[in-house]
Amino acid sequence: MNRYLFTAILTIATCGGCENNAIESKTSLQATEEASAPPISVEGNSHSATDRTSSDNVGTNLTDQRQQYVSFPAAGVKLVRPKGFDDAENFHGFQQPNTKSSVMAVMIPGPYSETSRGFTAEQLKTHGMKLRSKEDVRVDGNTAVLLSVTQNAYGTEFEKWILAVGNEKETRMVTATFPKSEEKKLSNQLKAVVLSTTIDDTPPPDPTTDVGFVIAAPTKLKLTKGISKMLMYTKDGTIPLKSAEDPFFIAGSSISQGPIDDRRQFATQRLLNTANTRIIAVISNSEITIDGLDGYEIVADGNLTKSGNTVKVYQVLLYDDGTYILMQGRVAAHLADEYMSEFKTMARSLTRKPK
């Protein structure tokens, strides 16, 4: 299967809304990795196909008996709002901050037949998740797969219900995340929400609509159909990339950053966590202010973890009243002179939209 597809799906499933640093997965350079890998056979606990109406307590604790749906055109789904959850600000779905729980919906380019084969116990483990169960289901008349997984993140054990459904063009994924301590209260309720998924074929909005800031249009890169509430730019405006060395730029906002004692160190650590890239040298790490927000601009050399080819990485992390904005660009080292100035111009043009 296309490595980009599997990586992007697990990237979002890993931390989608689960804690304060969810953006570290959602805006990771990992989300645009495109290298190919062979199909992976299905592993884990499998069950025969069932219909969502057979699940336990499907209607339990939803908004009301009418099961009022909320539409998320950018993610291509409609979901029933869980009781006590608000609309999420920085991703498509719902959140309950006091319990660190969420339901996040995304649409990822790529056929369901390929992406669904990647949900194996072995592959989930590489992303810090343990597969508890795997079940074929039907939602809105479509074949889908429902996973129950656990994950330790930021000192808390989380449980997740992950649903993937789609066609030969795209995969829709809905991930419900909640602390294990809230299992008795939330597990059946959020499972029901996930299984309430209905396909929404409303034309998606322009990718810039759902993002809380504006970036000046680049001259060498084109805006793509992004994943979740973020901006993504590639050479030809499409993903996956044709080559891992092709330039791309991505920007998004965190849910909340939590307390940070050393902001420079935090920004540096975020750079070192860049997926599918091994940072080998930090060339510069400078304070920067953009649109009144203070942060750090970092330039580094790295190697692609698969090929070993050298790349140049650019990052700006801006702190914004309990959240942060992360912008990253990557390109082959031999193209750095052409694209690094583009990355800098884009990042420094950021302007927040009025709230």
Image: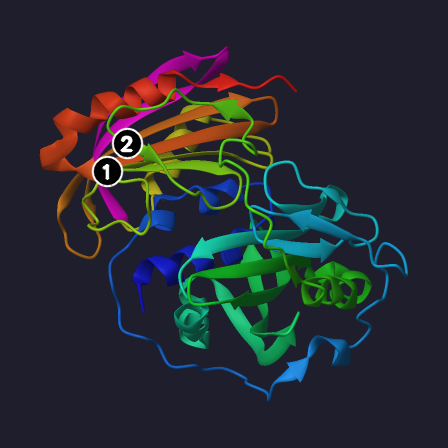
Which residue lies at the image location 38% right of the left edge and 40% below the top edge? 224
Q: Which residue is mark 2?
A: 221
Tag nearer the camera, 1 or 2:
2
Check disc 1 and give the amino acid type.
Answer: Pro
Q: Nearer the viewer, residue 298 or 36?
A: 36
Rendered position, 178 above or below 146:
above
Mark with earlier residue (1, 2): 2
- Which mark identifies residue 266? none
Work out whether 293 lies above or below 114.
above
- Does 89 lie within the magenta span? no
Q: Is residue 332 left or right of residue 90?
A: left
Magenta range is 277-301
Image mark for residue 247 = 1
- Choose between 179 and 345: the one closer to the eye: 345
Q: Is residue 156 above or below residue 262?
A: below
Asked if the residue under mark 2 is in contact with the one under mark 1, i.e. CB atoms within 8 Å, the reply is yes
Relative to residue 21, is residue 139 drawn left or right? right
Marks 1 and 2, Cα distance to the nearest angstrom? 8 Å
